[in-house]
């Protein structure tokens, strides 16, 4: 069996990848490797449960949410390439004094799907790296600097802590995947070119919220449920993992569609998932892998954010499936 290329070796061969971005990506990989160990040892370390506190979105924080966030701050925040970091678990962005000359910003959800921890289902981390305006480099970071469209990203990806620990990302030249070799502590290239399959019989949506959906979303799901006898003319399987990262990875491997729509529940009129550190990186990966991602009003990568924790609806996956869903969404 041919030897697998390590992450460091791979990054050294990527054309036009600047050293600062290479170093930043390696620090994210180090953080994800450390979080993988935290996830493995959560029952032993007593970190399965929730804390008596909430994050800025009003969501209950798990012990591992906070511990994973601390890992990102410690390992990625130590690198001067990142002038500031933004996280689902922090009200405002965080910056280490002396890093004002860093050319990049890092935003992330340190532990996506943390409600899966107690039942040993897949969880993940998702991240996005944004460039700073050259005119701002050397000055303290202002929150407005984070408010960039997804098309501005220079790299984005996720780690999936499941049956294997995977690191999947793109720095603008396709999507690649690495598997953590725990014996060596190395990320090894196992998925050199991930492409979204054009067709699939799978779609993912949380059907518990059906009564709150718009008529377009409901009509699409009913068409899927009608199977081969319905308007789509094909039997479908519904999937739902409770972790966006796991859904993204399934689509990169098997195709299909993931939908988290806006709905009529209080606070969900614009969707639930966060734009900057969940939907934008997901959309970036879909675009790089030949898929698509839309919000309520068009491509996710074109949405202009107005605040750090802005929410959005999203549908992502095979371009053909996204286009079909969008047709139902628009009536």
Image: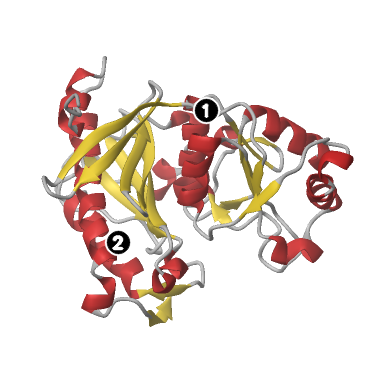
* Identity of the residue drawn at 81% across and 65% down: 211
At horizontal 56% and vertical 54% (from top left) the residue drawn is 273
Scheme by which the image is coloured:
secondary structure
Residue at image location 75% in from the left, 38% down from the top = 325
Tell me the SS state at disc 2: helix
| Residue 234: image location, x then y, percent | 78, 37
Quadrant where the N terminus is found in the figure: top left
Give the image location of residue 305, x and y in percent: 54, 44
Q: Is residue 12 left or right of residue 213?
A: left
Query: Residue placed farthest to the top in the image?
Result: 15
Q: Please, which residue is most extreme toward the left here?
A: 184
Comparing 232 with 137, the one in front is 232
Residue identified by numbered label 1: 287
Q: Compared with residue 45, is residue 5 higher up or lower down, i.e. above or below?
A: above
Q: Is residue 310 left or right of residue 139?
A: right
Nearer to me, 292 or 280: 292
Question: Residue 71: which disc?
Answer: none
Rendered position, 15 above or below 312: above
Element type at mark 1: helix
Q: Is residue 227 left or right of residue 194?
A: right
Around disc 1, counting alpha carbons within 10 Å, would you say few (fewer than 14), some (14 to 19), or many (20 or more)? many
* Place of residue 62 in the rendered image (x, y in percent of width and height, measured from the top left): 38, 74
Residue 51 visible from this viewpoint: yes
- Pointer 1 and pointer 2: residues touching (CB < 8 Å)? no
Comes first in the chain, label 1 or label 2: 2
As drawn, the label of residue 69 is 2
């Amino acid at each position: 069996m041919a030897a697998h290329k390590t992450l460091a070796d791979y990054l050294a061969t990527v054309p036009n990848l600047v050293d600062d971005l290479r170093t930043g990506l390696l620090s994210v990989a180090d953080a994800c490797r450390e979080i993988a160990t935290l996830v493995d040892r959560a029952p032993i370390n007593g970190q399965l449960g929730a804390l008596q506190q909430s994050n800025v979105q009003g969501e209950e924080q798990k012990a591992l949410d906070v511990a994973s966030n601390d890992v990102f701050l410690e390992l990625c925040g130590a690198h001067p390439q990142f002038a500031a970091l933004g996280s689902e678990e922090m009200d405002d962005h965080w910056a280490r004094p002396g890093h004002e000359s860093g050319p990049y910003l890092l935003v992330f959800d340190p532990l996506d799907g943390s409600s899966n921890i107690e039942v040993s289902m897949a969880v993940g981390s998702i991240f996005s790296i944004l460039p700073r305006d050259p005119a701002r480099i050397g000055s303290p970071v202002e929150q407005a600097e984070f408010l960039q469209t997804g098309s501005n990203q220079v790299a984005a990806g996720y780690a999936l802590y499941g049956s294997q620990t995977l690191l999947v990302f793109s720095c603008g030249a396709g999507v690649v995947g690495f598997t953590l070799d725990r014996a060596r502590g190395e990320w090894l290239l196992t998925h050199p070119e991930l492409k979204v399959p054009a067709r699939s019989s799978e779609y993912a949506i949380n059907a518990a919220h059906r009564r709150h959906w718009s008529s377009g979303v409901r009509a699409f799901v009913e068409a899927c449920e009608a199977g081969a006898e319905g308007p789509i003319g094909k039997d479908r399987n519904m999937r739902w993992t409770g972790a966006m990262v796991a859904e993204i990875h399934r689509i990169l491997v098997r195709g299909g569609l993931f939908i988290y729509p806006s709905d009529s529940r209080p606070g969900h009129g614009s969707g639930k998932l966060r734009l900057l550190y969940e939907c934008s990186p997901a959309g970036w990966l879909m675009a790089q892998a030949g898929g698509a991602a839309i919000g309520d009003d068009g491509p996710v990568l074109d949405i202009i954010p107005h605040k750090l924790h802005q929410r959005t609806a999203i549908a992502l996956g095979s371009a053909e499936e996204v286009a079909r869903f969008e047709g139902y969404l628009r009536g």
